[in-house]
Image (cartoon, rainbow, N blue to C red):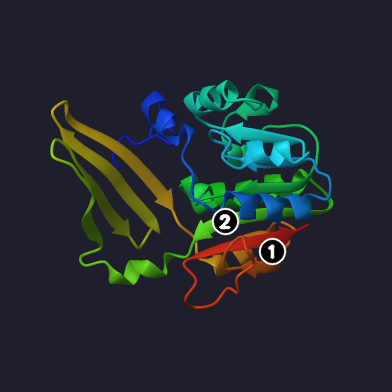
Amino acid sequence: MKGYQPGMSFGPDEARKYRDLQRGDEAEAVSFIHGLAAGGPVLELGIGTGRIALPLAGAGIRVDGIELSPSMVAELHAKPGGDKLSVAVGDFSDVPVDGTYRVVYVVWNTFFNLLTQEAQVRCFRNVSRHLSAGGCFVIEAYVPSFLHQLQGQQYVRAEDLQVDEVSLDVLRHDAATQTLEESHVSLGPAGVRLNPVVQRYAWPAELDLMAQVTGMRLRERWGGWSRQPFDSHSRIHVSVFEK
């Protein structure tokens, strides 16, 4: 989208929406990361409002974070225990923190908010520098196999229909750049509101190559946080790369 800047989708209004948002797999994700951490510490890239970080910290792990949106950080710090988490505001591809971690993780497709392959490789390289011996980089993301279903490389889908408001999801796919340009559109008495989201997706095999060229390798890959087998029907993957 012309004029789009990473982070512009996560201002105060969107941060309030994310504040209490749950997916239902939080306990499984926390258990998965907790097991790899072996006592910690861990670093979350794109920590948001603490959906995973807060329960993980509550389980006795030291959790640090990086977040581009000050509004998301404000919501995190307003939650019970949130002010105890150390969060660096900045581009997580640069990993602008000191020290090393047992686990660095990024969830819910957030890795794809890095909009070029170069930025994604830079993230892998910088994460590797911050992993302790035997440390792991964990990525949860969707598998972009659904893209073959698009007609004309785009779609419009109704997300929510109310008497006085309609919410639409509008998406366009650029296969050449592996980019998805999406906007969540709300139509109501207050007018039209757009929440744009742009992502640069990567197939699991491409992530494996990024790991190899930055001194890591794939250790395991699952079809979800409960360690479901990853196969051709998997809609998401949880990939664990080790240094």
Between residues 4 and 160, which one lies in front from this camera angle? 160
Judging from the image, what secondary structure is the residue with disc 2 in? strand
- The residue at 66%/49% (across/down) is 30
Tell me the residue at 55%/46% (across/down).
Answer: 119
Q: Nearer the viewer, residue 145 or 229?
A: 229
Q: Real-space Cα distance between discs 2 and 1?
A: 18 Å
Front residue of 115/105: it is 105
Which residue is more in the foreground, 59 or 64? 59
Position of residue 241 relative to residue 40, above or below, is below
Q: Quadrant of the N terminus?
A: top left
Q: Which residue carries the number 2 mark?
A: 140
Left or right, 157 with respect to 115, comes to left
Q: Is residue 227 above or below residue 188?
A: below
Q: Is residue 147 above or below residue 24?
A: below
Which residue is at the far bottom?
Answer: 232
What residue do we see at 36% from left, 62% from top? 176
Tell me the SS state at disc 1. helix
* Mark number displayed over residue 64: none
Q: Position of residue 6 (x, y in %)?
A: 43, 36
Position of residue 172 in the picture relative to residue 22 (left or right): left
Residue 121 screen position, x and y as percent: 60, 52
Return the residue at label 1: 212
**What type is the residue that disc 1 sits on?**
Gln
- Eye-nearest disc, 2 or 1: 2
Q: Residue at x 40, y 27 (%)?
A: 11
Quarter of the image with the C terminus is bottom right
Of the residues shown, which amino acid type is indicated by label 2? Glu
